[in-house]
Amino acid sequence: MTVGEASGVQGEDAPVRVFLVDDHGLFRAGVRAELDRVDRVEVVGEAGSVDEAVAAIRHLRPDVVLLDVHMPEGGGAEVLRQVRPDLPGVVFLALSVSDAAEDVIAVIRAGARGYVTKTISGRDLADAVHRVHGGDAVFSPRLAGFVLDVFSDRPGAAPPGDPELDMLTPRERDVLRLLARGYAYKEIAGELFISVKTVETHVSSVLRKTQLSNRYELSRWASDRRLV
């Protein structure tokens, strides 16, 4: 984890202080390199795990946190859960490879101000950072219509949630979605870049949380919640 100096009082022309949270070091390096080319954005630190992120964000108090959704130990939603109550001035922008509806809902309900996918260009990402820092909500074009639909029934309210689905971590939902589509454990492992043992652990956890007995019941459960 790389940390910078804690912030002082900022003027209007001061750069937006950004903190990166992602469990892939190469991806963090690429984002840092892209943002370093842009004026008025300063990357002040980075972390590759939930615990590192929580400690460093509390210390540095950045303006904007670029937050990966899928990480071990609860992912981006867990970082939000631990940090937001104590640091309401820190803005979180999800930056994820996933554009799945449940991932978007989960992280927005947890308090993120926006959600963009990792296909975004460096300059557009910098623009998104400035916009959320300025108070806007920012979403990738593919997600914007979906988010509007979710909020349309209850303007100003958080998106509706499924209490049973909310029990699952983003990674458990990824595994469940592929399992319900008929993927074997080895295929799921390859698709998500995790080990077969980790897949087995996630499946066991989902079975325990849902109180179901086998993959066929899980597939039906996932289909009922439109995960497939």
Image: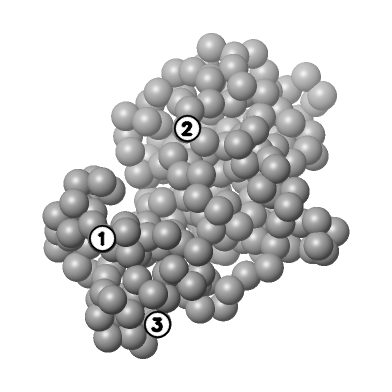
Q: In the drawing, does residue 141 fall left or right of residue 195?
A: right
**Amino acid carrying mark 1 in the image:** Gly
Residue at image position (64%, 33%) is: 141
Residue at image position (48%, 72%) is: 224
Q: Position of residue 24 (x, y in %)?
A: 33, 38
Q: Nearer the viewer, residue 217 or 175?
A: 217
Residue 96: mark: none
Q: Nearer the viewer, residue 197 or 52?
A: 197
Tag 3 or tag 1, which sits nearer the N-term? 1
Question: In 3D space, how far apart are the residues under numbered discs 1 and 3 (Cα atoms)?
Answer: 19 Å
**Quarter of the view holding residue 80:** bottom right
Residue 182: mark: 1
Q: Position of residue 49 (x, y in %)?
A: 38, 51
Q: Nearer the viewer, residue 198 or 185?
A: 185
Count of number-bearing discs: 3
Q: Is disc 3 surrounded by few (<14), some (14 to 19) or many (20+) residues within 10 Å?
A: some
Q: In the drawing, does residue 17 fall left or right of residue 4?
A: right
Residue 118: mark: 2
